[in-house]
Amino acid sequence: MKRLQDKVALIVGADNRDNMGQEIARRFVSEGARVVIAGRDVEEMSRFAEEIKGTFRQCDITCKADLAALTAHTLAWGGALDVAVNTAGWGLTKGFLETTEDELEKITALQFKGPFLFFQAVIEAMQRGGSIIQISSATTQAVIENYAAYIGTKAGIDHVVRCVANEFGSRGIRANSISPGLTETPMTAEAMATPGVRECFVGRYPLGRIGTKGDIAAGAVWLASDECFMSGENLQINGGLLLRGNPTSVDVGAAIEKALAAKATD
């Protein structure tokens, strides 16, 4: 039997073609789950829901009414909710002193308030226990420059995950987060196409390569399955990055200059 056979899963943030949320959805379906996707891009969700033979609903994760409608849609379509995954996020790159109040409010809403409300909504809908999975970031422990607001909100919601696990474990609900490092996704494609960037980061990973969406999806399958006896934890799926830490901006700049210089002499 497949690992997620007959489970109903809800994945928020799977509205960008071939992003991490969509990869997780594909893996869940391959393991027997029925999947509901949610996000803001209706056209892309419609296309992808047809691909995976699932369903979708437009949803703003920061809106409590949207989340209530989303869980109601999930229960009406699937008859239950067993797995809830939040992959929504914003990779704000801004110096600490340059981060504006508006940006701070926006990222706090998306990466702290939104997940908090999402957890509340799905806990209410999980009548037979289940698994909640939050996508966090290795940067909460392997700090990188110009990501203070991003790191702070991701770290904060990691601790909320622990509180959820503690309070609702008696109902058979597990809650965990996953911390990728630099991962090949549409969001990082432009940065990793810059000469020297990939090579600079690869050297920080003991396993010798950048992470993939498939790596994260494999971890999500385990967390979603009945094989998992873990709750309140942060799963570090990043090739050992925490052993060495992220490169500094000086390291990255030097790597880019070196790569461009080598390219100019070819």
Image: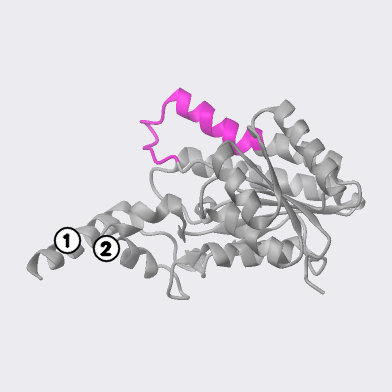
Q: CA distance from mark 1 to mark 2?
A: 8 Å
Question: Label 1 is placed on what type of residue?
Answer: Leu
Q: Along the horizontal axis of the image, is 23 left or right of 70?
A: left
Q: Residue at x 32, y 67 (%)?
A: 199
Residue that mark 1 sits on: 260
* Percent coordinates x, y for residue 261 in the rendering: 13, 63
Residue that mark 2 sits on: 196
SS under mark 2: loop
Q: Residue at x 38, y 55 (%)?
A: 189
Magenta stretch?
92-114
* Percent coordinates x, y for residue 13 in the rendering: 60, 45
Q: Along the horizontal axis of the image, is 11 left or right of 192?
A: right
Question: Label 2 is placed on what type of residue?
Answer: Gly
Compared with residue 55, is residue 98 higher up or lower down, i.e. above or below? Answer: above
Compared with residue 225, is residue 109 higher up or lower down, i.e. above or below? Answer: above
* Residue 100 sits inside the magenta stretch: yes
SS under mark 1: helix
* Residue 95 sits inside the magenta stretch: yes
Q: Earlier in the sequence, mark 1 or mark 2?
A: 2
Q: Residue at x 64, y 51 (%)?
A: 50
Q: Are marks 1 and 2 in contact (CB under 8 Å)?
A: yes
Where is residue 29, by image quadrant?
Answer: bottom right
